[in-house]
Image: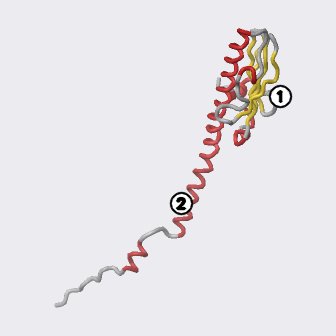
Amino acid sequence: MTLLRSHPPTPRRRARAMGFSLPELVFSLTIVGILSSIAYPAFSSTLASARRSDALVALMSLQTQQERYRAHHEAYGDLAQLGVASVSPSGHYEITLESASPTGYSVRAAATGAQRNDSACRHLRLTVDGLNLTYASGGSEATANAAALNRRCWGQ
């Protein structure tokens, strides 16, 4: 009586059993594409919001410097007198002092570079007029966002 011997798998059979087939690969890439198309907009929005804090830091710092300067002078100062840079700390916004007087000032932060894609909050304006403090935002220099969107741009 002879025993049947099974032959060990050949290297060719082993190689064939490993890896993905073309349909499996296409299916996997489709799933990855769908998930990334959902995640990317959310990530972009979060990134824009985080970069917006760069402008908020710059504007609040400028506000502090203005009050310090005004305590020793008859009017609010310009950026050079305050020793404040015209670019936000991380460089995502350009800072412009639009007006300065004995009773108040207006300063605007305009998005630069990739932050310009933050279309609703591209411009942030801080205005001090006497004891009144106004926060404004918008997609253009007019900074005419509605109240709810304005609060979102300023992180309130």
* Marking on residue 42: none
For numbered disc 2, what is the local secondary structure? helix
Q: Residue at x 68, y 13 (%)?
A: 68
Residue 32 found in image quarter: bottom right
Measured along the vertical axis of the image, is residue 13 above or below residue 83? below
Answer left or right for 86 relative to 17: right
Along the viewing direction, whichever of 69 and 117 lies nearer the viewer: 69
Where residue 72 sits: x, y (%)? 72, 9
Query: Is residue 102 visible from the viewing direction of this image?
Result: yes
- Mark 2 — residue? 28
| 78 in relation to 15, above or below | above
Q: Indicate which disc residue 142 carries.
A: 1
Who's the residue at 78% across and 34% down the image? 139
Q: Is residue 146 visible?
A: no
Up/down of 2 relative to 33, above or below: below
Q: Are marks 2 and 1 in contact (CB under 8 Å)?
A: no
